Amino acid sequence: MTERTPLIAGNWKMNLDHLQAIALIQKLAWTLNEKNHDFKDVEVCVIPPFTSLRSAQTLIEAEKFELSLGAQDISKHASGAYTGEISGAMLSKLAVKYVLVGHSERRQYHNEDDSVISAKVAASFSSNITPIICVGETQEQLQEFGPSAIPVKQVLAALEGQENLREFVIAYEPVWAIGTGEIATPEQAENVAVEIRAAIGQKFGDVAEQVRILYGGSVKAGNVAGFMQGANIDGVLVGGASLDSAEFAGIARYKKHIVL
Ligand code: PGA
């Protein structure tokens, strides 16, 4: 079996200015360093708003922190007259390693459909940035189509026809569990991850074994370890709890937790 390095990623959404970002990243890195966190064993990534990326990059490089940096969105265009957009080339100059694509809040509030998401995945690949492709069903879809139909369909739509397939990560985030405190059970998350991996395998063969599949939706230090026990869950995408350095460090240190 392929070893997949777990990824703990914090999606800050539209929170914190760049000064607050510097303070949070410092605290997070100090806390983890003090506990001798092995970043090669469990990768930790912060995903602040665009306005904090430059400050975050400078800090991480100057202090030689081992944190990875991610962005919350990417333009599907390479450059040009697209007011307000940020290109993959701009992000990769800021040492951005990951980018969220297709987060449910983008799908819902910015009408991002499968074709936009697939174009953004292509833009990430051509800029050498690893997309974290977010998928998940609403409560109504769960009732109508069952647990894995929608996430699997969204994964395949995002990857369909990619000419330049490179490393990607999938984040399974049931919409009904995001920011609600309502949470999928580890078994539910594992079952969907199994289906997603099988569908990727059918379409793309062996790469399926290397793809990291994250769970997201109301993850906290107190519940992360259960999810990480799933053989097909390779990390978590954390929203609210990533804004608290102690809580997020606790999530990254899930291996130290005892699961009853
Ligand atoms: P949450 O958000 O952890 O606050 O539920 C997760 C996400 O939207 O990525």
Image (cartoon, rainbow, N blue to C red):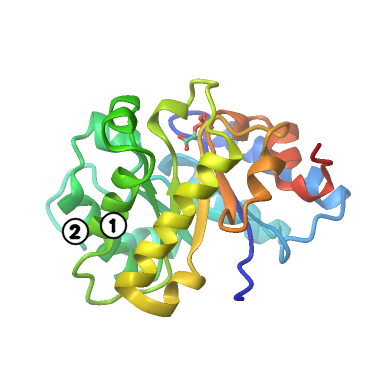
Report which residue position mark 1 lands on. Answer: 87
Q: How many marks?
A: 2
Check the picture and name the quadrant holding the C terminus.
Answer: top right
Q: In this view, does 201 lie above or below 59?
A: below
Q: Residues within 10 Å of mark 2 (few under 14, many from 20)?
A: some
At horizontal 43% and vertical 62% (from top left) the residue drawn is 197
Q: Is any atom of residue 27 visible in this view? A: no
Check the picture and name the quadrant holding the N terminus.
Answer: bottom right
Nearer to me, 258 or 96: 258
Nearer to me, 89 or 111: 111
Number of the label disc, if any, that sits on residue 120: none
Q: Which amino acid does label 1 sit on?
A: Ser
Q: Position of residue 118 (x, y in %)?
A: 22, 57
Q: What residue type is labelled 2?
A: His
At horizontal 60% and vertical 75% (from top left) the residue drawn is 2
Nearer to me, 231 or 38: 231
Secondary element type, mark 1: loop
Apparent side of residue 231 relative to residue 118 in the rendered image (left or right): right
Report which residue position mark 2 lands on. Answer: 77
Q: Which residue lies furthest to the left in this view?
A: 81
Sequence-first tag of 1 and 2: 2
Q: Where is residue 63 in the image (x, y as percent from the top left)?
A: 72, 57
Q: Residues within 10 Å of mark 1 (few under 14, many from 20)?
A: many
Secondary element type, mark 2: loop
Name which quarter of the figure residue 65 lies in: bottom right
Q: Where is residue 7 in the image (x, y as percent from the top left)?
A: 60, 56
Apparent side of residue 68 relative to residue 86 in the rendered image (left or right): right
At horizontal 35% and vertical 63% (from top left) the residue drawn is 199
At horizontal 35% and vertical 26% (from top left) the residue drawn is 139
Q: Do the residues labelled 1 and 2 touch (CB within 8 Å)?
A: yes
Q: Disc 1 and disc 2: Cα gap in Å? A: 7 Å
Nearer to me, 208 or 101: 208
